[in-house]
Image: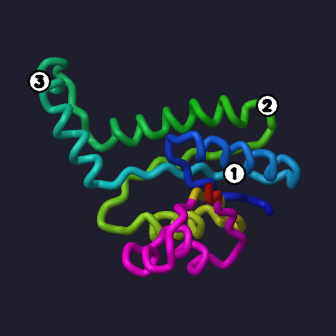
Amino acid sequence: MDRGLVVFEKTDRNKRLLETAGEFAAGAEADLVLLSTLSYAEYEEDKDALKGFERIEGTDYGIDTFRNRLEQELQSVANETLGDTGVEYELVPRIIDDRSETDAILDAAEEYDVDHIFLVGQKRSPTGKAIFGDVAQAVILGFDGRVTVDLE
């Protein structure tokens, strides 16, 4: 592995996955790209919830504010989790519009020329996967490289 992509959400499972990816990257002397996404729909919901604060505080909670928040959360977890490993990493906060999360992951993998993806998956029955889809499965099928999925 030369460069890995860790798909990160703010959960304990993702933190453990980041630790695992960090150990793997340290052993391989590889870099990591940490991707955190927020859907445009979630952004709109959060922005609507903060409209009252905008008037009171005289500020604007635009898309850059939310991207910065994603980046700060990533930086905090990365410092805590990867700080002692010596692994170099790049933070990639993304607000994704009408694209699926799978597309955002595969686009970032291509953009940053990664050869390994780390992500958390969901245990689903074959019927559940057929009806609802599965990001991990779609990434495995769409990525031409290694994929590590944490299925707890």
Tell me which numbered mark, 1 or 2, is placed earlier along the sequence: 1
Task: Tell me the kind of residue under disc 2.
Answer: Asp
Residue 141 image offset from top left, x and y in percent: 58, 80
Task: Tell me the kind of residue under disc 1.
Answer: Leu
Q: Are marks 1 and 3 in contact (CB under 8 Å)?
A: no
Please give the label number shown on residue 84.
2
Q: Residue at x 88, y 50 (%)?
A: 27
**Image quarter for residue 88?**
top right
What residue did someone put label 3 on? 55
Q: CA distance from mark 2 to mark 3?
A: 42 Å
Please give the label number shown on residue 32.
1
Q: CA distance from mark 1 to mark 2?
A: 14 Å
Circle 2: is it few (<14), some (14-19), or many (20+) Cα within 10 Å? few
| Residue nearer the viewer, 149 or 98 | 149
Stretch in magenta: 121-149
Left or right of residue 52: residue 11: right
